[in-house]
Image (cartoon, rainbow, N blue to C red):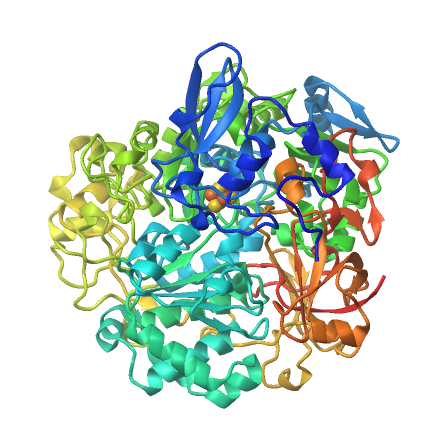
Amino acid sequence: MLTKKKAATAAGPRLAKVVSGITGNTVDRRTFLRTSGIAAGGAALAAALPPGMVKKAEAATPAAGTGTIKHVKSVCTHCSVGCTVVAEVQNGVWIGQEPGFDSPFNLGAHCAKGASVREHAHGDRRLRYPVKLVDGKWQRMSWDQAIEEIGSKLLEIREKSGPDSVYWLGSAKHSNEQAYLIRKFAAFWGTNNIDHQARICHSTTVAGVANTWGYGAMTNSYNDIHKSRSMFFIGSNAAEAHPVSMLHILKAKEQNNAPLIVADPRFSRTAAKADEFIRFRPGTDVGLIWGILWHVFENGWEDKDYIAQRVYGMDEIRAEVAKWTPEEVERVTGVPGSQLKRVARTLASNRPGTLVWCMGGTQHHNGNNNTRAYCVLQLALGNVGMAGGGTNIFRGHDNVQGATDLGVLSDTLPGYYGLDEGAWRHWARVWGVSYDDLLARFASKEMMEKVGIPVSRWFDGVLEPKDNLDQPESIKGMVFWGHAPNSQTRLPDMKKAMEKLELLVVIDPYPTMTAVMQDRRDGMYLLPAATQYETYGSVTASNRSIQWREKIFEPLFESKTDHEIMYLFAKKFGFAEAMLKNVAVQGNEPSIEDLVREWNRGMWAIGMSGQSPERLRAHMENQHTFDRTTLRANGGPCDGDFYGLPWPCWGTPELKHPGSANLYDTSLPVAEGGMGFRARFGLERNGVNLLAENSFPVGSEIRDGYPEVTMAMLQKLGWDGDLTEAEMAVIKEIGGAKIEAVNWKTDLSGGIQRVAIKHGLCPHGNAKARTIVWTFPDPVPLHREPLYTSRRDLVAAYPTYTDRQKFWRVPTLYKSIQDKDVSKEFPLILTSGRLVEYEGGGDETRSNPWLAELQQDMFVEINPFDANGLGIKDGQMVWVHGPEGAKVKVKAMLTERVGKGVTFMPFHFGGWFQGEDRRGKYPSGADPIVLGEATNTAQTYGYDSVTQMQETKATLCRVSAA
Ligand code: SF4
């Protein structure tokens, strides 16, 4: 369907006009198509590039004009693979770009998005100066005026309704330093109503995985997949969402003959590369995984020694799995038992194997059950804690891992310390402010320690009557800082909320769909933020490696960096000095290096303490010295380090810990990146030992499991004498009369970590992973039918949860929605996902002429069987109606990619709303080239039972001719 693009001509007058305007010394269109791995029609894989089709930066044709051409390294801002971009800069102008050949992540490859980031940064559709709505029209204003007006209004809201009535929505597009600063900023404002995109992409992963074995992150790396003997992908379309990762995946496939198994409701571009494709009904992941595990247990293929030493609770899993006979699995998921037996055998006989998942698994109302079920499968096979194994959870945005780690979340401070008094006291010490001063900024101690409203529900915080909320007042002021609203469900409700707010602010390089989806007349501002190419600092790739970006050029137009904007608001609010006590400010810009050093001093719990700016810069400068599989430097200034010092990188920078490439790997000493599972769930449960048994990292002086390391433990072992005087002084200051209570997470000297590692111990202890999370609504992961299910016959056996009155401060419905049977009027399942050409809400990428040409129309994929029954032809405009009353107008794409009864829409489009093209509402010249309906206008209610993740992968719809 979508207009076929020829190699040499733009598809239509609109795009032809745009493309013809691109001239000068940048990449030409043909080179772009070649170097981005895109053939006509938009094939996705950079891995398919023959080596001769891309050139090294030094071989670039010199640009016209005079002046030395400098090569500056940055990192692509479009996904978590973390591909290096080498910019060619002449006289301060970014004139050309090449992929980084020395980067172990991309090895000289880029996908379409990475190959065109210069156009994104230099985009002539960016927001150029601050504007505000005056009687429905955008009016230019100065930054001074904007900070003054917005700041005064926010202070007025704070005064009248309290600090929790303002919502600070941060971003996975912030650098680590900006992410850290905005979390601190919210603390100084006095609210936990702060969050970012991780809530709606991988919050169920973070909660599920952290509660299984300690940390909520990808365990291994893209590169480590080179060592996998099998690869199981579920709910991940890496070929489109993480294109350059396919370099590594296909290497394992070819080099190791590793079978690639792809489980997905849709025959995706990743599935096209698979040895085995499992098509299953959306929302039945737990049933599918238990169906595989049924065969594993039935045949005794589980790793019994590994389970005995390193896993708690497998017997309770066994009892649940026993119910998932091949017949039941087929009834629920639609997958035949014979296929799953084959898959189980393949996984069992090709170890170590990796398991990869993405938003197909996470975005469900029982998403935390899915992520835990995936972990359990890997634990049963003994696949976690070794090279080639693990759960490789591909994150989305370039810094969604870092923004999560640095606490741009409503339920924690940086480093996953949580929100209890101990956590606040820890960060108050790091910040050099008194706990009481921080407390005074909040409405109360209770509000200071209460999780905030998650981004998935911010608009319910506006719309719900005050009495339904678990905070003093509703949300009245909203600041969108690098966030696209169309990435969220229930857009008609969000529109209402946007119109009800007293103040709505967008801070972004592009106006985003927020600018046009509401019908406000005033009380709204758009502020131009700089991109990451106009500043510098660190960014964390999906595998926890931290890369350093250098500044390519000065902020364009009147845009300002995020940290400068934070400083200006903090100054207006009167807390800039206290907030930046340890941070130098040059002009209006807080020092990036000082911010790194400050987060280094507080992030002990995940080992983001050893990555100084100097070490990170050295890694970027010496990329060529790192092995492309192990990620370890072989000689050179970084000898022995893992690339990007993936956390945990224990202790202070002076300790020179190399980082940890693979989590929970006991084959290495802790000093070299080894560790067991984290001890965070207690010592025993129901009389069963929760610590590891006869399993420990190489070189450990305790040759068994042990709890997390505290001062009391060092004293008992007689190791406290190893602490230096300076370390002891810090510990005494923190602990006061109770120094024994100071531990590896709260000791600001790093001494406890250093001494533990000296004796071969991992600071976080050495425990078993747990397969049952007794604090969650479903301790053993259970299948639950989607809220909007077409399988009414399964609701009684697999019902959803009961409604909750106040959950993350808002009412949250489950049963009352599922009880309404709408399956007759809305008979088709609707799911959603990504396209290779665009990213997130798509405003940046749809404004990029190179990318816009490749994908011009929003569409719905529908199986020809269903379309023929409805009398719908390929390419015709249709309405997709959602069961909550919204509808979107899109092109029909008839394809067998989706099975009968299933439809799919990509989620990057915006600018239309229920059939109406809203192009005219953008500030002049800032409208993206391609507009379209947002799938999330029609996507419905549904939130994870632990994290409030939105449900976007399994709702219902009806399709009719438009
Ligand atoms: Fe690499 Fe991802 Fe950027 Fe593509 S979008 S170039 S895969 S970082």
Q: Left of 487 or right of it: where is 379? A: left
- Taking 365 as reference, is 168 above or below it? above
Q: Position of residue 445 (x, y in %)?
A: 54, 45
Q: Nearer the viewer, residue 137 or 710?
A: 137
Identify the residue at horizontal 56%, vertical 81% (top origin): 334
- Taking 839 as reference, is 351 above or below it? below
The answer to whether one can see residue 816 in this image is no
- Taking 799 as reference, is 412 above or below it? above
Quarter of the picture holding the N terminus: bottom right
Q: Position of residue 787 (x, y in %)?
A: 66, 72
Q: Left of 119 or right of it: where is 643? A: left
Q: Position of residue 768 (x, y in %)?
A: 28, 66
| Farthest residue, direction right | 135
Identify the residue at horizontal 84%, vertical 37% (top origin): 920
| Farthest residue, direction top | 66
Q: Position of residue 128 (x, y in %)?
A: 69, 24
Q: Nearer the viewer, residue 553 or 961?
A: 961
Total count of labels: 0
Q: Looking at the rendering, which quadrant does residue 755 occupy?
A: top left
The answer to whether one can see residue 63 in this image is yes
- Taking 244 as reference, is 667 above or below it? below
Quarter of the picture holding the C terminus: bottom right
